[in-house]
Amino acid sequence: MMSLPARSGDVASRPNRRRFLTSEWPKWPPGGLRPVGRFLSTGRVALGALHWLAWIIVSPRSVVSGGVAREIDALGVSALRLVGSASILVGLIATFQVAYQLKQYGAESVSALAIGWFGTREVGPLVVALLVVTRSASAITGELAAMTTGGEIDALRAMNLDPVKYLVAPKLAALCIALPALTIISDGLITLGGWLGTTLFLGFNSRFYLEQIRTSLSTSDIAIGAAKSLAFAFIIAIIAADEGLGVDRRVAAIGEATSRAVVYCLLGVLAADTLVNAIFYFIPNLI
Amino acid sequence: MRSSTSSPTSSERALEVHRLTGPARAPLIHDIELSAGCGETVLVLGPSQSGKSTLMRHLVGLELASSGTVAVDGRSFDPTKPDEKALRGLRSRVGVLFEGSALLRRISVLENVELPLLEHTHRSRTRARGAARELLAEVGIEIADETMPAQLGRAGQRRAALARALALRPRLLLLDEPTLGLDSQAAHEFDDTLNGLQKKYNFGIVIFSHEIRHAYGPVNEIDVFAAGRIVARGTRRQLIESDDPVIHGLLHRRERER
């Protein structure tokens, strides 16, 4: 041993590399209760995001608000082509499927009724949500996970700045605006796809199709679809952000978190949709 | 154990760490004693994966310690259960330059520097922007307002991160591998800028690095760190004369680097 005074005792054995690399605070509670900790962590992110979302609405000229426009562009506007083309195809598929089933009963002509109602209330919000999950949830998780492993999240915390405020709230605000907007656009394009199928392939005229759609659609259907998409936006933003912020400090963990985020978001959206459908089934006069 | 709320201590030093062990869930650093005065530079020198970054994270409350105390600029906080108020007080006095700069990629360099000014001071956006430009000029960067971090080279990013760390005029600056990946000239220029700013603002500096070249700069004290412990402490001369195998290995690497 050297002659210098060593204040801190002998050299200990080298720490376990894996444990060192995966060190990240907080990771509570340990072991078998980890799912509970995960749930609490997601809840904390959700509450924080809601708090800062309210703050953005109250104080729209803040530092964070500039990020909302950027996120709307990244998460919403750039998804327009995908949502648009997929919606037209879904409209065509729905036409063929519904017409095929009704043909057995000689009721092929009322297929537009089903397309208008089911497309707006169910297929539109769900298709848009699933497309946004596959496209944007992975992007949100990947971005936040890369920032976590790259030290940007720590840098924010070290400056006493809340990462949820700067990174999650703008994404939540953007999705809450973009998803209902995309859903309404998708509703229109599914109807367009239905019109193409009905007129070009089933041989009905446009006036007949539009009358059927007018009969089947009501404002409340569009409102319910938009409200559902708002709930989906919240689920997607919070799950994806929580997965990104909770990632281990390993490069390989980014891919794992991204896959997990897509799976959990898909399940979350489907579960929420099931719940809403069950509510409307058991309480039909709710709206 | 001290109270978790900030309270003045008798020390006037920029940093005082006493018997720090952590993280609480699985300790990797043990019984750390560390101190740095205002205007002083302390080098924590040790091999990669020895726990230097973990130690630095404890000093700004990013890790929960299992025991010990930390005092910054004469105010102590309990790293085992820091409360929000104590953390706010601590972090307003400490500037941190993380390994790899850690600038926010989605906003411009100027916005990165003005962010702490807008959030923690009462300056208007115009005044914060002006102050951010001055800070960038002080660290030797003159860029357009829209320049993004990715448009800067590694040395430029490091300087911009230094400007951000100094935005709130901290009493203590923590630097994690500050010149890692920079060429020799850029590293020396960065050191010169840092030393000039320290003379001007009289803040304490703690450098966490595995690069022995820092030992040949103007450092007041070198703490040799290995496997989560400080195994030796002294001046550069004392280290050169040491026959400790860990220190000998580090100095020998310097010769190879040359």
Image: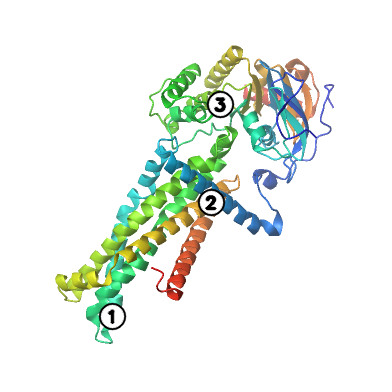
Q: Position of residue A185 (x, y in %)?
A: 29, 57
Badge 2: chain ID: A
- Which residue is drawn at the image coordinates 31% and 58% (left, top)? A184
| Front label number (3 vs 2) | 2
Q: Position of residue A151 (x, y in %)?
A: 56, 38
The circle on residue A100 is 1
Q: Is residue A240 left or right of residue A157?
A: left
Secondary structure found at label 3: helix
Q: Is residue A261 left or right of residue A286?
A: right
Do tags 1 and 2 sit on the same chain?
yes
Residue with the mark numbered 2: A46
Q: Amino acid at mark 1?
A: Tyr
Q: Is residue B119 left or right of residue A82?
A: right
The quadrant of the rendering that contains the N terminus of chain A is top right
Instruction: Decide: is B9 above or below A220.
Output: above
Give the mark nearest the N terminus, 1 or 2.
2
Q: Is residue A111 left or right of residue B178?
A: left
- Which residue is drawn at the image coordinates 66% and 49% (left, top)? A27
Q: Position of residue A154 (x, y in %)?
A: 58, 37
Secondary structure found at label 2: helix
Q: Amino acid at mark 2?
A: Ala
Label 2 packing within 10 angstroms: few (<14), some (14-19), many (20+) = many
Label 1 packing within 10 angstroms: few (<14), some (14-19), many (20+) = some
